[in-house]
Image (cartoon, rainbow, N blue to C red):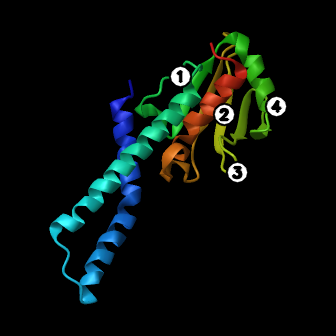
Amino acid sequence: MPDGRLVLRLWLSEFVSFVPLMVTMVLVLVQVVDDGFARPAFGEVAPVPVVWAVLGLLAALYVYGALTRRARGTGIPVTVEALAQTQEHTFPAGRAARLRAVLDSSERAFAVVGRERLEFRWRPFRGRRSVAGSVTFDASSGEARVRIRAGEGLTGLQGVLRASAFVALCQMVRMVGAE
């Protein structure tokens, strides 16, 4: 069952992205009046936002499905928190060494620096967009704490790009091995 709050938040962001196109369509309908055609009735203009609302809902459901597929098998819940700019996860002692190996060898990871605290960049998607991350290792318990931040305007984008930190975390958990 989809998380209703997440779908609602995704729908609102998708719908807002359609507003310029909706306004353009309504203005074109009104512009036809100036060219000598009949004035559009409210019934001719009213369906425009409804159609775009339905398209926005379909886009939101698609994004929800994409986030669910990315989180499958990782143990990370797909909730409204998936859209948060910062994601955190703790790897148990047995997986901390594997995490370091993944950061050193993965094509998605780059600019990995540090020893006790690793700083890195991670490409969750194809292309040059990346998120910033850090890993701190607890010597006493052997755990590794990952913190991923989606800065640089990625959270202002629509769709799956908006949840880039969540996507990156899911990829890392999958590469290291789910608990």
The spot of residue 130 in percent (x, y) is 66, 46
**Label 3 CA crowd tier, 10 Å (few <14, some 14–19, many 20+):** few
Disc 1 to disc 4, C-alpha distance: 23 Å
The spot of residue 168 in percent (x, y) is 62, 35
Image quadrant assignment for residue 103: top right
Tag 3 secondary structure: loop
Amino acid type, mark 1: Ile
The spot of residue 101 in percent (x, y) is 80, 25
Q: Residue furthest right?
A: 105
Amino acid type, mark 2: Ser
Disc 1 to disc 2, C-alpha distance: 19 Å
Q: Closer to the camera, 154 or 19?
A: 19
Residue shown at 21% from the left, 62% from the top: 46
Q: Quadrant of the C terminus?
A: top right
**Label 2 CA crowd tier, 10 Å (few <14, some 14–19, many 20+):** some
The spot of residue 100 in percent (x, y) is 77, 25
Mark in the foreground, 2 or 4: 4
Tag 1 secondary structure: loop
Q: Which residue is mark 3?
A: 127
Of the image marks 3 and 1, the number of the one nearer the N terminus: 1
Q: Which residue is mark 4?
A: 104
Q: Is 149 located above or below residue 144 in the figure? A: below
Of the image marks 2 and 4, the number of the one nearer the N terminus: 4
Q: Which residue is mark 1?
A: 76
Amino acid type, mark 4: Asp
Of the image marks 3 and 4, the number of the one nearer the N terminus: 4
Mark in the foreground, 2 or 3: 3
Residue shown at 54% from the left, 32% from the top: 87
- Cβ–Cβ below 8 Å for labels 2 and 4? no
Residue 134's label in the rendered image is 2
